[in-house]
Image (cartoon, grey):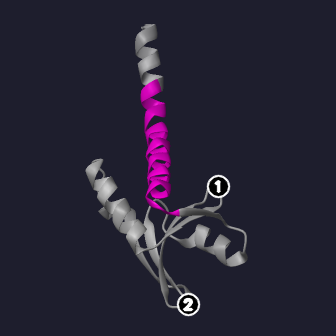
């Protein structure tokens, strides 16, 4: 025989089901605010090349991109069509702050390669 679920348990089940998505969004928002805090600049993806990077760089990771001999550290945000772009010093500050806050930066990083060769 079917028994109704207590209201508190139903609320807990709904929160549990929604929790992972919310937690992921919070991690992404935290990561993006941390990137800006350490010196990365948010650039809207306006040109076809920028839009290509937003679509093709690994999401949720900082990638190195070489452009005209200059190394950039790039984090794409496909949901807002934005690239967060920084230099080596910004990236090093990002790694230090992330480590201090208990985030492992290893899973956030990916070497992309030479943009000019793409």
The stretch of residues the image draws in magenta is: 15-40
Magenta-drawn stretch contains 82:
no
Does the magenta stretch mainly form a helix, a strand or a loop? Answer: helix
Q: Marks 2 and 1: which is nearer the front?
A: 2
Residue 56 lies left or right of residue 47; in this view the side is: left
Label 2 vs 1, first from the N-terminus: 2
Q: Which residue is drawn at 30% across and 64% down?
A: 106
- The Cα–Cα distance between marks 2 and 1, rounded to whole angstroms, is 26 Å
Q: Position of residue 16 (x, y in %)?
A: 42, 29
Magenta-drawn stretch contains 28:
yes
Q: Residue at x 67, y 67 (%)?
A: 45
**Total numbered labels:** 2
Q: SS at mark 1?
A: loop
Q: Where is residue 11 in the image (x, y as percent from the top left)?
A: 46, 17
Q: Which of 13 and 61 is in front in this view?
A: 61
Residue, disc 2: 68
Residue, disc 1: 80
Is 71 located above or below residue 32 in the figure? below
Q: Nearer the viewer, residue 44 or 90?
A: 90
């Amino acid at each position: 025989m079917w028994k109704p679920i207590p209201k508190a348990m139903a609320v807990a089940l709904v929160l549990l089901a929604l929790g992972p998505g919310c937690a992921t969004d919070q991690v992404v928002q935290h990561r993006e605010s941390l990137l800006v805090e350490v010196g990365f600049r948010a650039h809207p993806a306006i040109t076809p090349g920028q839009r290509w990077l937003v679509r093709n760089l690994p999401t949720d990771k900082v990638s190195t991109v070489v452009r005209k001999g200059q190394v950039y550290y790039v984090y794409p945000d496909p949901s807002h069509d934005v690239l967060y772009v920084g230099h080596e010093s910004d990236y090093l500050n990002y790694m230090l702050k992330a480590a201090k806050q208990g985030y492992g930066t290893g899973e956030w990083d990916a070497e992309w390669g030479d943009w000019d060769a793409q």
